[in-house]
Amino acid sequence: MKHLSTKKNIIACAFICYFANAFGFNNQEPTTTDSINVACLYEVSNKVKPFTLTFCTEEQTTQAHDGQDVFRDKRTVEYRVTETDSKIVIKRKVLHSEKAVLVADKNTRDIYFDATCVLLCGLLKPQKTNLQELAPYKVACSYSQSNGDSEITLYKINRLSKREETYLGETVRFEDATEKLQYKSGENKFMLDGIKKIVSKLNLSVIHKNGTKHKVDIVETVVIL
């Protein structure tokens, strides 16, 4: 029984990773008016290629079941971004992590597995990618300003090739997935080295074997130090 539960969590974790980092799984054009090319999000100011950009972050992910916070993961992470004329390589190293269970009720906890260790942010996903491969991909977005800072909200749900999956008798449907990038400057210069904070949100519905339906919300905040 324990083996089955472990296998279920592994499958579900891979499923979360697939959907949360959806920057290029679907070749269809965005349905909204505004969009941004994925490759543009990796541009860096005042840098001559090849270059390496290294920075640390403080990250917190909270998972709620039916509106109640259940799991939380805090971590300090180091990122190393290397870019040449043809490719970009992102490496991620967790320096410290601290997990917490926020409710005592087992039934509430068991609505969905703890996914707070999964990186929701697509922009900083560890990868080795040819920049030409990113060129065709666009993500629907909206622009705003807050206290002089520029913000882009990416609507990643439209990038999914499918939004529902059933495994081991449970159905998971992804309702929404967004990623808000907050930049230091209010001049609409959206450079990778100008990001202050990234807030990623993932909303899904879980239907258990007995037909009960629950809402799961996962929010990740990444603050660049």
Image (cartoon, rainbow, N blue to C red):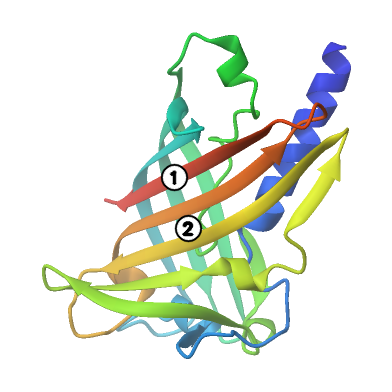
* Residue drawn where x is 56% and y is 19% of the image: 108
Rendering coords of residue 65 (x, y %):
52, 31
- Callout 2: helix, strand or loop? strand
* Drawn side of residue 106 relative to residue 80, left or right: right
Evaluate whether residue 23 shows in this view: no
* Drawn side of residue 133 relative to residue 54, left or right: right
Q: Nearer the viewer, residue 162 or 116?
A: 162
| Mark closer to the chain start, 2 or 1 | 2
Say few, some or many: other residues with alpha carbon within 10 Å of mark 1 (under 14 / 14 to 19 / 20 or more): some
Q: Are marks 2 and 1 in contact (CB under 8 Å)?
A: no
Rendering coords of residue 26 (x, y %):
73, 76
Residue indicated by mark 2: 80
Residue indicated by mark 1: 219
- Mark drawn on residue 146: none
Q: Which of the image's four quarters has the N terminus?
A: top right
Q: Nearer the viewer, residue 163 or 219?
A: 163
